[in-house]
Amino acid sequence: MRQEAECTIKEASELLNIPASTLRYWEELGLIHSHRLPDSNYRAYSLHALFEASNIAFYRKMGVSIRQLEKMKSRSLEDVITAFDITTEKFQDEITRLERALRRLKYQRALSKHALDLIRNGVREAVPIITRLNAYNPESQWQRKILVRDMQRYALFIDAKNPDEMIESYVDYPKGSEADEDAKSQEDDVPVKINEKTGIVGIQKKGAHKETGDKKEGGENKNARSVGADSRKKLVQSRALVKTQDLLEHQTSDQAPLVLWDRASEIEKGVRFFEGVAFSEYGKKVHVRTAPLFEAAKKAGYNPLYAIAHFLVSADFNGQKDCYRVWIGCSK
């Protein structure tokens, strides 16, 4: 007769929720032990053997390999503690990654809900959530990396006097805000210091575009060209820009990007903002129709100065692709 504490491989499998084939494999490796019942020659596992199997299952769930488990048989207690520390660190890294992913999912859902709200309810008065608009330099790998990792930092600056010309840019958020934390979570491994020439503004003209921004045979990408000195001067003269021409002319390669727009400065000037929504079209890099929003501001008795079209969410909106939250800066 078998002892009360012993069980067959079938019973052990059900008790531990481990396949019988796995128990046999572990036994072949010497990780767990059983003995044969004299009357049936079936495997029998003592309570201590079940402890062993449960322990192995625990290590396997933690990601410890079979090879590592075999080595642990001959390790000291100090080695085992070190193995625990290493595994704990790996788990903590994974928890951090999952928390970051969950935070981003929640933020993306909030953005999508906000887009739907804007579509349903129309234009409203609202101060922009962004604090600054920086000119996108198409030659900057660092800036490109930022936008690829976090599309919600992509925006366009559009002068009301010339709504067909769009200046590509990326946004900064208030420090500590939900948007700022989400942006930071996408910027791991992105260097803080910019070592590339700044002050080169990417211009996006309405019209068809090709997938890459690389130079084509015998010419440049006209959809995102570099702005020369005359164009820079014209841009700086706009009320939306906060840097002086003198600063632009003396920029060095290690300075921060050209700031196109600053929220605090604009509010101080008395600019009022109205928030609406606009869409881009499939097959075009940027084709955001802000003209209706400019007209709406005029009908409300305001003088539209510029628009900031901030990428919100990508989906199919009846044949239109991307939804932009648009802030119209106005004076009375």
Image (cartoon, rainbow, N blue to C red):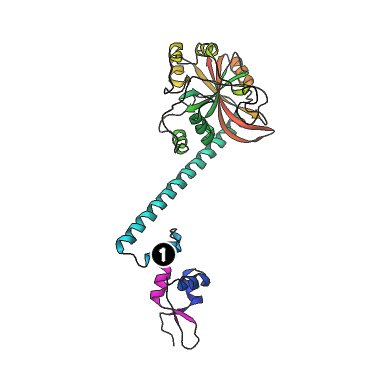
Between 295 and 146, the one nearer to me in the picture: 146
Verify whether residue 266 appears in magenta: no
Residue 90 visible in the current orientation: yes
Q: Position of residue 294 (x, y in %)?
A: 60, 18
Residue at the farthest front position: 218
Identity of the residue drawn at 37% across and 54% down: 86
Residue 129 visible in the current orientation: no
212 with respect to 195 (left or right): right
Identity of the residue drawn at 53% across and 37% down: 110
Residue 163 occupies which quadrant of the picture? top right
Q: Position of residue 123 (x, y in %)?
A: 58, 24
Q: Position of residue 332 (x, y in %)?
A: 53, 12
Which quarter of the rendered picture does the N terminus lie within? Answer: bottom left
User: Which SS class for mark 1?
Assistant: helix
Q: Count the labels in the image.
A: 1
Residue named by callout 1: 69
Residue at the farthest right position: 319
Between 326 and 213, the one nearer to me in the picture: 213
The residue segment tinted magenta is 34-55
Residue 67 occupies which quadrant of the picture? bottom left
The kind of residue on which mark 1 rests is Leu
Local crowd size for mark 1, using a 10 Å CA cut-off: few (<14), some (14–19), many (≥20):
some
Between 329 and 200, the one nearer to me in the picture: 200
Q: Position of residue 6 (x, y in %)?
A: 43, 80
